[in-house]
Amino acid sequence: MVRIAIVEDEKLYEKQLEGFLHQYEKERKETFEITLFTDGDEIVENYRAQFDIILMDIQMQFMDGMTAAEAIREVDSEVIIIFITNLRQYAIRGYAVDALDYVVKPISYFAFSERLNRAVRRLKKRTKHTIIVKIRGGIARIDAEDLYYVESRNHTMIYHTAEKNIEASGTMKDAEDMLVEFHFCRGNKGYLINLAHVDSIQNDYAVVRGEKLLLSRARKNAFMEELTNYWGEVK
């Protein structure tokens, strides 16, 4: 399912865009979850990276689409933004916020479907799976494949990634729920380890990218069983 937001203050274009999306669903056998917003301030408020594609009108009454896109980009670098506009010169500014494309009003289905098709293709090319965690002042997206392990330390969750360590709020249970489908396993009460990055087992330690992580007596057997099963799957 592709999660799409329409941000449009003119009812005529809102209904037209929604109708075009349903037409595209039928023609291309896609499934969309569509959410409607009537102004930029509505989507920005409590935004939490919940959409795959945003169809954003540029000229709106309270918060214009460019300002809304700038605010969204501060917390979400991945969402695909397509601007809907009356004037091409406004759309050119969209590249400053990494907009994928723009559609000029009045909107034709052909022009719209071409842009949407490009967006859907980009989504399908993304092979990485991301999780979203709460950090101080916002949220962060983390590629599960690049996450070595999760550590619980002093009521803080630390996500050890290939690029950097990210401190977030939450619990180990939250992390387990998010990562359950990505071959992560508890080594002890303080570590949730990505089996794909385990280099070896040395005595009571899992060696993850050269770092030794202690396996507790209570969890070692279950961890070894899951690791063995995983290694068997990826041969």
Image: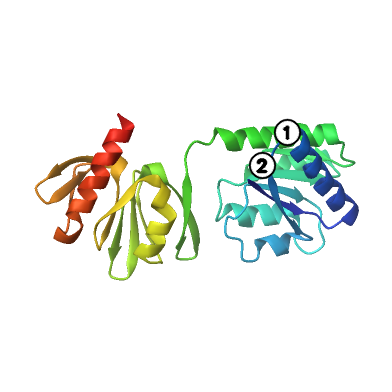
As drawn, 201 above or below 34: above
User: Where residue 216 appears, x then y in whole percent?
Assistant: 16, 59
Q: Compare residues 121 and 70 and report the one nearer the observer.
A: 121
* Within-10-Å neighbours for mark 1: few <14, some 14–19, many 20+: few
Of circles 1 and 2, the one toward us is 1
Q: Which residue is mark 1?
A: 28
Q: Quadrant of residue 191?
A: bottom left
Query: Within the image, what quadrant is residue 96 found in?
Result: top right
- Say which quadrant the C terminus sits in: top left
Instruction: Give left or right: position of 108 versus 211.
Output: right
> Where does label 2 land, which residue?
99
Q: Toward the viewer: 205 or 221? A: 221
**Amino acid type, callout 1:** Arg
Residue depicted at x 79% and y 60%: 38
Q: Amino acid at mark 2?
A: Ala
Horizontal side of 155 relative to 55 (left or right) equals: left
Q: Quadrant of the N terminus?
A: top right
10 Å crowding of disc 2: few (<14), some (14-19), many (20+): many
The residue depicted at 39 percent of the width and 46 percent of the height is: 182
- Residue 105 occupies which quadrant of the picture? top right
Closer-to-camera residue (100/127): 127
Q: Position of residue 73 (x, y in %)?
A: 59, 52
Residue 195 relative to residue 24: left or right: left
Residue at position x 25%, y 43% from top? 227
Please report the residue visible at 40 percent of the width from the left and 52 percent of the height from the top: 180
How is colour applied across the structure in the image? rainbow
